[in-house]
């Protein structure tokens, strides 16, 4: 892999730079999303639709703990990128050291708490009835590997902040490929069922951690830490926390959404309806990978150039990122509107020996997914403005507007909508909440982004 210096973030043409940053990010997110998607297909076909629902119940808890690492990573990387842009290498090193220490401390405490309250958390997130037992198996095993995942999430954002997106891409590909291989081995060959699915996920986290550790210990990284860099520094911790809280709050709200959705849908249609949402949730992770890739590629470019006070390049990075992400989102929208039934059919298969109840559950899920998927993704062409706008404020270190805009879609609009609309429209009320929240949050974010550009980025 060609060596790339962080300084190139401030000199190369924005379009070329965004493509170079976004393509590896998109490929990495694609492979991770495919991993989640294929993992669900394997679990659905080899274990059953209830197993997919069980994993969906566990995801918000494990993802929240992993998001602690991501939030520390993104918050610290914003500081790190601006420090490198302003040629303050000492601060960059101290920030990275604090990121590692803070990630370890926080995630280990959260894992201990998560295991202690296991029998309370699983039912609270919709793990009721037949879902509880497989969810508990998966939750217990996966939670042990979550600190490794948190360190991977944190390290990946730092690799990207150094201007080395290809290495960050590989860090996302390795665990994804490893998980699929271990899925096949543990579930299909060894017939370990939910235990196999859980150990495959945990093993993939450790593979990712091993690669990230190698990167920072090798000559590929410009950040060579000293022992004193790991000592916690209060001003840096405050800055990491204020910016990282944006990402953490987003994931916390996402976990609340999972909790509400699983319980609301369980009340509307039992375990089968939870399975419908589980598959839709996988598509939400997978289908938008190019848009998320552009957003990830945009962050270090905006941070570095803002730190270097190159306002014209910052403005250009915003407009270019929105154009690229919107075009890709429109392509995704068309595919999902045309092929929802075919996509749903990939997840579930009728295996020999399946009970009549399992066959009925599969039929229910396949019948309900196409209409639900069309509603959920109805506003996809406009979401780029919301994602890039919220990411911009985080990239430049403005924590408060970043937090408010990040929470706009799910916190301010979506949660109230799913609490109210199903009372009047039933299942349809759940699904139409998605596009309404997307449109409203895009309008709000677009207004504040335009105002910020006019006020702060004038030449």
Image (spheres, rainbow, N blue to C red):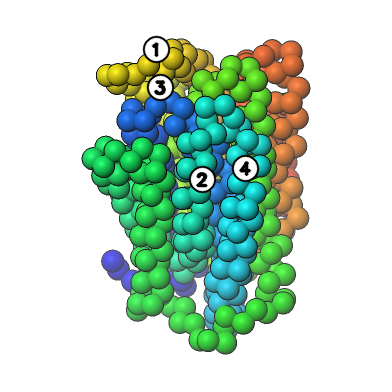
**Residue 39 place in picture, x, y as percent:** 37, 38
Q: Write down the residue under mark 1.
A: 356
Q: Which mark is residue 139?
A: 2
Q: Is residue 49 above or below residue 301?
A: above
- Residue placed at 66% from the left, 24% from the top? 264
Q: Is residue 353 above or below residue 437?
A: above
Tell which circle, 1 or 3, labels the residue nearer the N-terminal end: 3
Question: Callout 2 environment at 10 Å: few (<14), some (14 to 19), or many (20+)?
Answer: many
Q: Write down the residue under mark 4.
A: 119
Tell which circle, 2 or 1, labels the residue nearer the N-terminal end: 2
Question: Helix or strand or loop: what does disc 2 sit on?
Answer: helix
Question: Callout 3 environment at 10 Å: few (<14), some (14 to 19), or many (20+)?
Answer: many
- Residue placed at 65% from the left, 28% from the top? 263
Q: Write down the residue under mark 3.
A: 344
Q: CA distance from mark 4 to mark 2?
A: 11 Å
Tell which circle, 3 or 2, labels the residue nearer the N-terminal end: 2
Q: CA distance from mark 1 to mark 4?
A: 30 Å
Q: CA distance from mark 3 to mark 4?
A: 32 Å
Contact between labelled residues 2 and 4, with CB atoms less than 8 Å apart: no
**Residue 141 place in picture, x, y as percent:** 46, 50
Residue 420 seen in this snapshot: yes
Q: Nearer the viewer, residue 304 or 250?
A: 250
Contact between labelled residues 2 and 3, with CB atoms less than 8 Å apart: no
């Amino acid at each position: 892999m060609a060596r790339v210096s962080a300084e190139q973030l401030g000199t190369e043409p924005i379009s070329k730079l965004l493509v170079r940053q976004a393509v590896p990010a998109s490929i990495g997110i694609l492979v991770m999303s495919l991993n989640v998607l294929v993992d669900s297909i394997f679990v659905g076909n080899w274990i059953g639709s209830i197993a997919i629902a069980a994993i969906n119940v566990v995801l918000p808890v494990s993802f929240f703990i992993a998001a602690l690492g991501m939030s520390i990573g993104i918050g610290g990387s914003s500081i790190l990128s601006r420090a490198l842009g302003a040629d303050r290498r000492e601060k960059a090193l101290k920030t990275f050291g604090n990121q590692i220490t803070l990630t370890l401390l926080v995630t280990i405490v959260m894992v201990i708490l998560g295991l202690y309250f296991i029998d309370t958390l699983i039912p609270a997130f919709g793990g009721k009835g037949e879902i509880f037992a497989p969810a508990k198996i998966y939750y217990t095993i996966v939670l042990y590997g979550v600190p490794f995942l948190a360190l991977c999430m944190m390290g990946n954002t730092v690799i990207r902040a150094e201007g080395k997106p290809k290495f960050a891409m590989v860090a996302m590909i390795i665990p994804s490929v490893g998980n699929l291989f271990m899925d096949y081995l543990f579930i299909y060959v060894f017939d370990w069922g939910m235990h196999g699915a859980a150990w495959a996920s945990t093993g993939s986290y450790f593979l990712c951690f091993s690669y990230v550790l190698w990167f920072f210990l090798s000559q590929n990284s410009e950040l060579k830490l000293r022992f004193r860099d790991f000592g916690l520094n209060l001003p840096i911790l405050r800055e990491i926390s204020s910016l990282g809280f944006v990402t953490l709050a987003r994931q916390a709200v996402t976990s609340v959404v999972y909790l509400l959705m699983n319980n609301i849908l369980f009340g509307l249609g039992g375990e089968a309806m939870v399975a419908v949402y589980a598959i839709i949730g996988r598509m939400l992770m997978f289908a938008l990978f190019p848009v998320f890739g552009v957003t990830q590629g945009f962050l270090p470019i905006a941070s570095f150039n803002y730190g270097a006070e190159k306002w014209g390049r910052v403005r250009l990075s915003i407009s270019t990122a929105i154009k690229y992400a919107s075009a890709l989102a429109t392509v995704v929208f068309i595919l999902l509107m045309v092929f929802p039934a075919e996509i749903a059919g990939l997840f579930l298969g009728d295996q020999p020996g399946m009970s009549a109840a399992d066959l009925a559950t599969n039929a229910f899920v396949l019948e309900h997914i196409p209409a639900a998927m069309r509603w959920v993704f109805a506003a996809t062409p406009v979401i780029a403005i919301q994602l890039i706008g919220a990411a911009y404020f985080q990239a430049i270190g403005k924590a408060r507007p970043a937090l408010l805009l990040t929470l706009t879609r799910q916190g301010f609009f979506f949660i109230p909508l799913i609490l109210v609309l199903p009372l009047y429209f039933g299942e349809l009320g759940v699904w139409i909440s998605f596009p309404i929240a997307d449109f409203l949050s895009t309008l709000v974010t677009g207004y504040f982004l335009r105002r910020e550009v006019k006020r702060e980025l004038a030449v």
